[in-house]
Image (cartoon, rainbow, N blue to C red):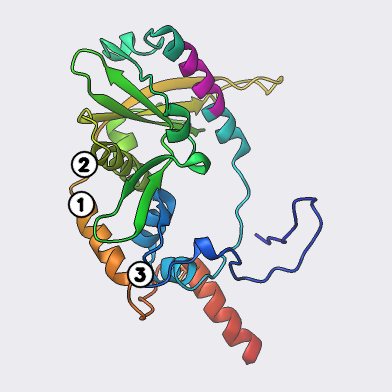
Amino acid sequence: MINLKRNNKGEFVEAKGRRSRKSSIYQPNQTEPFKLSRGKFEDFLSCQRCFYLDRVMGLASPGMPGWALNSLTDELLKKEFDICRAAGTPHRLFKESGLIDVVPFQHEDIDKWRDALRGGLQVPLEGSSILLTGGVDDIWQDQKSGELIVVDYKSQASAYPVRAQSYLSGTYHQAYKRQLDFYGYLLQNMGYAVAPVAYFYVCNAQKERDGFFGVMNFDETLVPYDWDSSWIPAKLEELLSVVNSDELPNANTSCEQCAYARERVIMETE
Ligand code: SF4
C-alpha cells in the first residue's frame, strides 16, 4: 500500500519520516512523565527495534487508514451499553450468556477510560517516569462480588460461527488476549478488584445473504477469556532496559516491512 502524507485540509505535504512532537519521543532515563499506550507496548512485543526507532529515536512509521466499519460497530455498541448503564440494567445478551447480576459499570471517569485520546486507563510504571495507558472498550460490574469485568468489542466477517475455544486459539487472536491482559493489569493496578474472566463481544457479519440491500446483519457472541497478566511485569522490565539503553535492539526477522526496506536499498544501489 502506498501512503501519501496530507495535512488536515487533505492537501499533499512533504513526508519527513520523523516525529516532530517532542512529547512522543522518550529520552533514555528521562524524568518528565512519558505516556506509553497499550498499542506501543504491543509494538514492543512484536519488534523491539521498531519500537525503539519510533519511541526513542523519533522515526515516524507510515500512517494506517482507519477501520471505519469496525469503529462504527464499537461506537454503536458503546451507545447501546450506555443506555443500560444509565438505567442500571443488564444488557440483552447477559442472561443468555449466564451473566447474572452483571450490569455496565457506572463511574464518573468511564468516558475517559474508554477513550485513549482522553487518557484511557492509566498506571505509572514503577521505577520510571512512564505512564502506561490503554483505552478499554467497556467495563461491566458483577454487582454481587463488586468485581469489574474487562470487555473488548470485536467485529469480523468469518464464514464460521464464533466458538469460544477456536476464537481464543486463533493465531491472530493472541494479540487480542494480550490486550485484555493489559487492561486487566491496568485496572487492577488502579486499585480495582477485577473479575478473573474478561469478555470479547464478537460481532460476526453474516455472509449467507442474497445481496447487500443496504443492510448488514451480525451474529453476536460473548467469548469469555480467563485473562492473565502474570507475564506483563517481566516484559515491562525488559522494555525499561531497552528504552534506557543507547543500543538499537535486534529486528524481527519475520517482518515483511524490514525485508522490503532492506531489499529496496539493495536494488536501488545495484
Ligand atoms: S523488523 Fe524492521 S520494519 Fe519490522 S518492525 Fe522491526 S525494525 Fe520495524
Please rate how many residues cluster around mark 2, counting C-alpha atoms within 10 Å: few if below 14, some from 14 to 19, many from 20: some
Question: Looking at numbered disc 3 in the image, what kind of residue is underneath it?
Answer: Val
Is there a contact, CB below 8 Å, between mark 2 and mark 1? yes
**Residue at 21 percent of width and 29 percent of height:** 193
| 81 drawn magenta | yes
Using the image as rendered, state which of residue 5 and residue 18 is in the foreground.
Answer: 18
Q: Which residues are magenta?
A: 75-83
Q: Quadrant of residue 240?
A: bottom left
Question: Looking at numbered disc 2 in the image, what kind of residue is underneath it?
Answer: Asp
Is there a contact, CB below 8 Å, between mark 1 and mark 3? no
Q: Which residue is mark 2?
A: 228
Direction from residue 60 to residue 129 in the image, left or right: left
Q: Quadrant of residue 268?
A: bottom right
Using the image as rendered, state which of residue 41 and residue 56 is in the foreground.
Answer: 56
Q: Which residue is mark 3?
A: 243
CA–CA distance in space, label 1 to label 3: 19 Å
Q: In the image, is the residue at mark 1 within 8 Å of ligand 1 by its beta carbon?
A: no
Q: In the image, is the residue at mark 3 within 8 Å of ligand 1 by its beta carbon?
A: no
Q: Measured from the top left, where is residue 31 in percent x and y? A: 36, 65
200 vs 56: above or below: above
Q: Measured from the top left, where is residue 138 in percent x and y? A: 41, 28
Direction from residue 11 to residue 199 in the image, left or right: left
259 vs 240: above or below: below
Q: Which secondary structure, mark 3?
A: helix
Q: Which residue is mark 1?
A: 231
Q: Measured from the top left, where is residue 200 in percent x and y? A: 36, 30
